[in-house]
Structures are given as structure tokens and as C-alpha cells.
Image: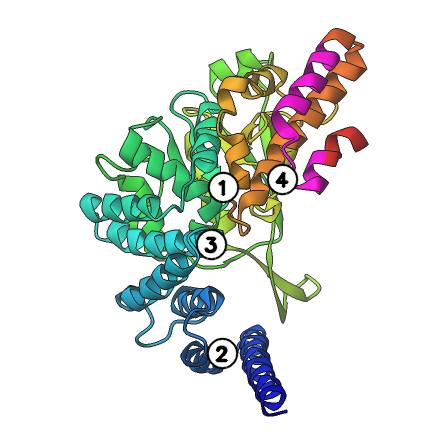
């Protein structure tokens, strides 16, 4: 009887500890969702005392502190000087669980935050240091390095490539810094161009790190970037004779980009006395600088956009896109229902076994936070299959089908892998 009671007591105690641990984590997550970041962190600090071998708790401690330092409003004491503590949390999570993909991702994101400070200080050595640190921690596994190379190789020489964020930007910059790979390309995280210091950084470039762009703005104009009063206006984008020739356009053709406002307020406003008052609208700094970059550079350099960026950042330019698989090229014409809507040659060049040597390694080196970017490969196959089907090219369609089975049916993501057959 004593043994039975002892077993029941131990079972109850263990159950209580597990229940408390789950409860604390769930409570912390709930506080974080409510933007009560300090409360969430304090709860996790208690949870890690109770269960010091739980990798997920360390992961959330690193994640929440990272978020508080960079993604919430500016807070005293929470900046890159706080990085060491954040690194320690992710280090511990990875030590307990060496395959913790999201912990590796956020370790890389923390490195990226430090790299941004290095850019601000024009410090190429520190910039390279933090990207190497992220690589060594496993933030850029082989499948992601391969993805980055395929992105860069989809761009023509001396291109400007707008990327979405950490998922595609960091790996491409790492390849440039440490493998000297496609350094002719200027890589720009599209959501970052509303920051005056970064705009000036792009204008001046960084020797050995970032190739500069043309930007026809004075330093004073750059530092004064702010929301601009705006409704909707057509802007003519300068075109080179080479671009006109490539797309068989006449000499007088003009590319007109309709720039719509993307910020709104509740203030009633009329520009002139006779005009009926309406809610005031603005052009965001991000869209204003995108316009400036395209306007200043397109006639001299090809421009591409990552296909994993949020389309809201494109500002309506996507109707001029030619899909190349992982990226889209900016063209001077509206491409829908034209031969330029899909760049068949570039997608065919992308979908080669030599470009997918490490694709299957995503199964063992999954980074759930960003692994979905590989869906662009599957979409590329679908686009190509539709072109072959429309043209009645059964032999190419058959080869593509076999290629899909051989390279992409790896039992990684059922939804992705079924998408081709469903289409």
C-alpha cells in the first residue's frame, strides 16, 4: 500500500510540474499576443527556473527579447547592446535541441540586427563578422544557400534586387560577403527603404560589401524623408534604347507607373478653396523611395523583385512583372496575357537538377519560420506546366512531370507537393 501511495504521489507531482510548465508557456504566449512583452518575459523567466531543460522556453525568451529590442516601439536599454543576452537564450535552445530550426533563424535575425548597426557605421569587418556568425550557427543551411544562389542567378548582370526580409535578404548578402557570389548585384530589403540612414547608405555604398545605386536626392532630402501629401499620379519612368529594343517599343513609348497613396488619416483636407474637403492621404516614405530608386536606375540597371516579398510593397509595379521563378523582372509594359508574363527560359534554367542538389536536405534542416519560401519552386513548375499545356508540348510536359516527381516529392510538405497535381 505504501508503494502504491508513493507511486501515486510521484505521478501526481510530475503531472503537476508538467501542467505548470505548459500553463506558464501558454500564459507567456498569451501575454505576448496582447503586447504585454515585459509580463511575457517575466513569466518565461520563472518557467525556465522550473524547467531548465526546455529548449522552447529559451527559444521564446530569445524571440520575445529580440522582438522587444527591434520590433516594438523604441525602449531604453533594448537595442543591440542587449544582444549578448538574446544570443545566450538562442544558444541554450540550440544546445538542448541541435535541430531547433526557428532558434537558428532568430539567431540569424539577431546577427542581422547587429549587421545593420555595422552598416550604419560603415564597418565592413563587423558586417562580415555577424553574417559569418549566423552561418556558423546554422541560420543558412545548404538548401537556403542554394535558394539564395538560384535567386541571384535569376538576375541579369548589374541588377538591383529587392528582397522581402530576413528569409531571402540575409542569405544573399552572406553569399556576396563570404563567397564573393554575384557581387555585381545590389540587394535591397524592400521594407527597409523608409529609413533615411539606409537610403543614404545605398547612395554611397560600402566598399567590399554593398554596391551603390544612383539616387538623385540630396542628403538633406534623404534625411527629411516623411509621409508626403498624395492622392494618385502617373509618373513617367525613363527607359533606355536597349530596353525599348528588347520589348520592341517605339521611340516615343513611355512607361507610366500609377502611384497611389498608401497612408491615410481622418483629417479633412482640401488643397484649394474650391475643392470639396476629403480625408487626407499620403505617400509613405517606403513607396516614395521605391519610386525614386526605380526612376533613377531603371534606364541603367535591370531591376528584380523577390517573389516572396509582400506585394503591398510593390506599389502597383507588379503588373509590369515578368515572373522568372524565384524573382520577377521589372518590364516597361503591362505583362498580363503577353509573352512576357512568364519568362519561360529563366524558369527552365532554374528547374535543373544541378540547381537543386541540396533541396531535399530541407527535411533534416527545416526552419519552419521561413521554409515556406521553397513554395516558389513548386509555383515555378506550375507556371511552366501551364505554358507547355497551352502550347500543346506534350513531350516537355512529360519531362517536367518526371522532374517534379524526382526532385520535389520528398515528403516534406504535403500541401506544397500536391499543388502541382491539383493544378
Q: Residues within 10 Å of mark 2 (few under 14, many from 20)?
A: many
Q: Is residue 401 magenta?
A: yes
How far separated are the C-alphas under marks 4 and 2? 33 Å
The numbered mark at residue 291 is: 1
Q: Quadrant of the C terminus?
A: top right
Residue toward you, 207 or 170: 170
Furthest toward the front, the residue is 1
For label 4, the SS is loop
N-terminal label among 2 and 3: 2
How far separated are the C-alphas under marks 4 and 3? 16 Å
Compared to residue 114, the image places residue 399 above or below, namely: above
Q: What residue is shown at x 30% (from left), y 56% (from top)?
A: 114
Determine if residue 314 is in view. no
Find disc 3 in the rendering and name its residue.
100
To which quarter of the image does residue 172 belong?
top left
Q: Are marks 2 and 1 in contact (CB under 8 Å)?
A: no
Q: Which residues are magenta?
A: 396-417
How far separated are the C-alphas under marks 2 and 3? 21 Å
The numbered mark at residue 309 is: none
Q: What residue is shown at x 32% (from left), y 33% (from top)?
A: 176
How far separated are the C-alphas under marks 4 and 1? 39 Å
Determine if residue 104 is in view. yes
Find disc 4 in the rendering and name its residue.
412
Q: Residues within 10 Å of mark 3 (few under 14, many from 20)?
A: many
Image depth: mark 3 or mark 1 in front: 3
Question: Residue 280 location in percent, x, y?
Answer: 61, 64
N-terminal label among 4 and 2: 2
Find disc 2 in the rendering and name its residue.
40
Horizontal side of residue 269 vs 239, given as left or right: right
Q: Is residue 308 magenta?
A: no
Amino acid at each position: 500500500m505504501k508503494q502504491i501511495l508513493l507511486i501515486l504521489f510521484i505521478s501526481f507531482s510530475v503531472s503537476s510540474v508538467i501542467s505548470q510548465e505548459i500553463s506558464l508557456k501558454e500564459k507567456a504566449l498569451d501575454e505576448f499576443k496582447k503586447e504585454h512583452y515585459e509580463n511575457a518575459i517575466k513569466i518565461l523567466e520563472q518557467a525556465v527556473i522550473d524547467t531548465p531543460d526546455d529548449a522552447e522556453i529559451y527559444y521564446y525568451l530569445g524571440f520575445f527579447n529580440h522582438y522587444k529590442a527591434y520590433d516594438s516601439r523604441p525602449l531604453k536599454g533594448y537595442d543591440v547592446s542587449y544582444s549578448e543576452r538574446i544570443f545566450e537564450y538562442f544558444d541554450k535552445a540550440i544546445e538542448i535541441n541541435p535541430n531547433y530550426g526557428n532558434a537558428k533563424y532568430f539567431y540569424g535575425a539577431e546577427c542581422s540586427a547587429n549587421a545593420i548597426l555595422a552598416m550604419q557605421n560603415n564597418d565592413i569587418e563587423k558586417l562580415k563578422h555577424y553574417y559569418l556568425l549566423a552561418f556558423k550557427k546554422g541560420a543558412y543551411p545548404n538548401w537556403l544557400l542554394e535558394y539564395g544562389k538560384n535567386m541571384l542567378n535569376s538576375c541579369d548582370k548589374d541588377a538591383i534586387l529587392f528582397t522581402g526580409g530576413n528569409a531571402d535578404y540575409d542569405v544573399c548578402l552572406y553569399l556576396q560577403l563570404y563567397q564573393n557570389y554575384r557581387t555585381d548585384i545590389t540587394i535591397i530589403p524592400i521594407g527597409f527603404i523608409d529609413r533615411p540612414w539606409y537610403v543614404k547608405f545605398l547612395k554611397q555604398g560600402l566598399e567590399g560589401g554593398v554596391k551603390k545605386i544612383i539616387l538623385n536626392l540630396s542628403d538633406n532630402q534623404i534625411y527629411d524623408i516623411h509621409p508626403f501629401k498624395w492622392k494618385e499620379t502617373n509618373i513617367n519612368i525613363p527607359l533606355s534604347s536597349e530596353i525599348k529594343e528588347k520589348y520592341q517599343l517605339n521611340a516615343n513609348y513611355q512607361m507610366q507607373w500609377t502611384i497611389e497613396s498608401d497612408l491615410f488619416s481622418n483629417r479633412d483636407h482640401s488643397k484649394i478653396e474650391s475643392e470639396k474637403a476629403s480625408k487626407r492621404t499620403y505617400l509613405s516614405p517606403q513607396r516614395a523611395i521605391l519610386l525614386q530608386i526605380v526612376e533613377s536606375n531603371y534606364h541603367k540597371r535591370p531591376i528584380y523583385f523577390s517573389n516572396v516579398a509582400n506585394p503591398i510593397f510593390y506599389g502597383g509595379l507588379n503588373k509590369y512583372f515578368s515572373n522568372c521563378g524565384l524573382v520577377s523582372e521589372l518590364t516597361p509594359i503591362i505583362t498580363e496575357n503577353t509573352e512576357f508574363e512568364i519568362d519561360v527560359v529563366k524558369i527552365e534554367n532554374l528547374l535543373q537538377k544541378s540547381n537543386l542538389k541540396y533541396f531535399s536536405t530541407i527535411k533534416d534542416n527545416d526552419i519552419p519560420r521561413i521554409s515556406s519560401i521553397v513554395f516558389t519552386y513548386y509555383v515555378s513548375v506550375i507556371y511552366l506546366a501551364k505554358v507547355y499545356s497551352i502550347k500543346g508540348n506534350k513531350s516537355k510536359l512529360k519531362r517536367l512531370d518526371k522532374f517534379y516527381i524526382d526532385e520535389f516529392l520528398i515528403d516534406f510538405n504535403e500541401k506544397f507537393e500536391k499543388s502541382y497535381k491539383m493544378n
